[in-house]
Amino acid sequence: MTIKTLERELEAHRQFTAWLEDAGSAICDVSPQAFAGLFAPGGYWMDYLAFTWRYRTFQGRDEIAEAFGKTAAAAGLKGVEISAHRARPRLARRSGIEVLEGFFDYETSVGRGTAYVRLRLDDPSGQPRIWILLTTLQSLDGFAERAGRNRPRGREHEVGRENWLDRRLREQRFDDREPEVVIVGGGQGGLVLGARLRQMGVDALVIERNERVGDNWRKRYHSLTLHNEVATNTLPYMPYPETWPAFLPKDKVAHWLETYAEAMELNVWTGSQVLDGSREDATGLWTLRIRRPDGSVVTKRTPHVVLATGGHSGVPNVPAIPGIGDFAGRVLHSSQFRSGSEHSGERVVVFGSGSSAHDIAQDLCENGAASVTMIQRNPTAVISLDPCGTMVYAAYADDLDPADVDFVQAATPYPVLKETYQWLTRKTCELDRDLIEGLEAAGFRTDFEPDNTGFHMKYLRKGGGYYINVGASDLIINGRIGVRQAVDVEGLVADGARMRDGQVLPADTIVLATGYKNQQEGIRLLFGDDVADRVGPVWGFDENHIMRNMWIRTAQDGFWLMGGSLMEARLYSTYLALQIKADLEQVLPVQPLA
């Protein structure tokens, strides 16, 4: 560290300490006007549970004052101090604005919380004013995570009694008790939530239909590798080894998830499947029928069910392509595709143009398929892995704590997020000009959202529709992967796809990389129409610009949804676990406070 850098850090700490000493009384007071006066005009207050027991964003002093007035007394903040376990305060330039940013901790009426604040230094008063404040609840009194200083002591010296393994095996069987939570799905979302709950003292059972934890990755197509770097995808409590590659292969992720479940002492029933479930309003308990590996069906009763089958339902979306029953070859959904080597010498048509379609087409092409053609149904956002993909995820780096970066990323109100993505998209499209022009010339249509917010906003709004180029785009541009538009396809015939001009695109295999149905349909299959309709659609922005029905209480009591990427699982698992624990301890308000 240079002397200049050290001086800058010391100055940031001095300024932040001075601001917090002055602002602390207004933050802890119940005066709406005093609190709102801390903000710059047009500033944002975001809250994750600490005040509202929801994920909420308020903009402008009037809106902030109104929300604070409704929630401050119940929140009961006190003991504000600079966070000792988060990144130090720092001076930075954000969106062309000089800011001072840092973390502070506090006590609430039910637990402890942490806030991240970004202060503008250009206020006419000469005093720092809040541009963005994110307040969060991090733990409940009496139920802090059993990690670090709070780690359990263990009972390894009890000679002649049950040892650790005896207790673990008995605990996993659930012969002598009912779980407090049943998590349906043992992928990264279910496992990370299970780990959070366990550290809070919640007895959770994870149901995984695959034979092994990690099979949801292990059984996917042979060539799959994550498209963002390792620091983005680390799991709580157990960071990846420093020797691991920047981009993780699917099997490495799969093995790590299996290791994670064992190391975190999660109670997972593998090879098991929830057949159906229903809730009795009188008792507040769900009754679940679960098929075990030996074919037996057991019944478990629990107050809380979490559906953690990912960002989708797990139900393949199979489009009604005219003539699909006439096709003489094989038709596979992408979930059934394993390796391009199984299709060497074949003519393959891939319906779809998202990430899976690109990876499958590339795998086929590089493993000797006679021809590969993608049928593009909708325009697709495409960016290069390097430099653009690397630039987008640059906030996550090996020398930063992912939990701190998650905080900063979460503290981005939708209008700021939109402007940031528009800036990034202009930048990436300029850097990728040759790539985009080459794709368009090859007949591949690109699109970066009507408001030019780019690939990641497509993910947030639609759950797909983008591709980070790891080679397939180059194969499209040089003609090794053909592209046709779905509007030009009349239907399937025995030997391939008939185009509207009468030409037949020959095929031995059709791969439907057409995604999955909305998570609401997964709810419908397991819990019936009433529950599915009560919960409503899943994913995409709600009125508060939070993912609809994700990581928050739904309209169905005792029913929760966990999903998203590894990054989102790491962030939101804390808040979902806190809500469930708060409900079990009867401190969760019946209704959100604002």
Image: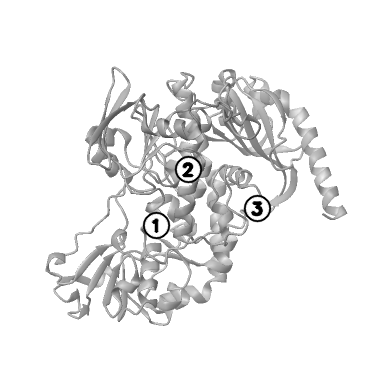
Q: Secondary structure under badge 3? A: loop
Q: Amino acid at mark 2?
A: Glu
Q: Residues within 10 Å of mark 2 (few under 14, many from 20)?
A: few
Q: Nearer the viewer, residue 2 or 286?
A: 286
* Figure quadrant of residue 590: top left
Earlier in the chain: of badge 1 and badge 2, it is 1
Instruction: Residue at 52%, 27% (x, y): give it.
Output: 52
**Mark 2 highlights which residue?**
262
**Residue 256: x %, y % from top left:** 49, 51
Camera-side mark, 3 or 2: 2
Say left or right for 222 vs 114. Answer: left
Camera-side mark, 1 or 2: 2
- For the question of whether residue 187 can be seen, the reply is yes
Q: Which mark is residue 95?
A: 3
**Mark 1 highlights which residue?**
218
- For the question of whether residue 457 can be seen, the reply is no
From what the image shows, is residue 157 above or below residue 550? Answer: above
Instruction: Residue at 49%, 19% (x, y): give it.
Output: 587
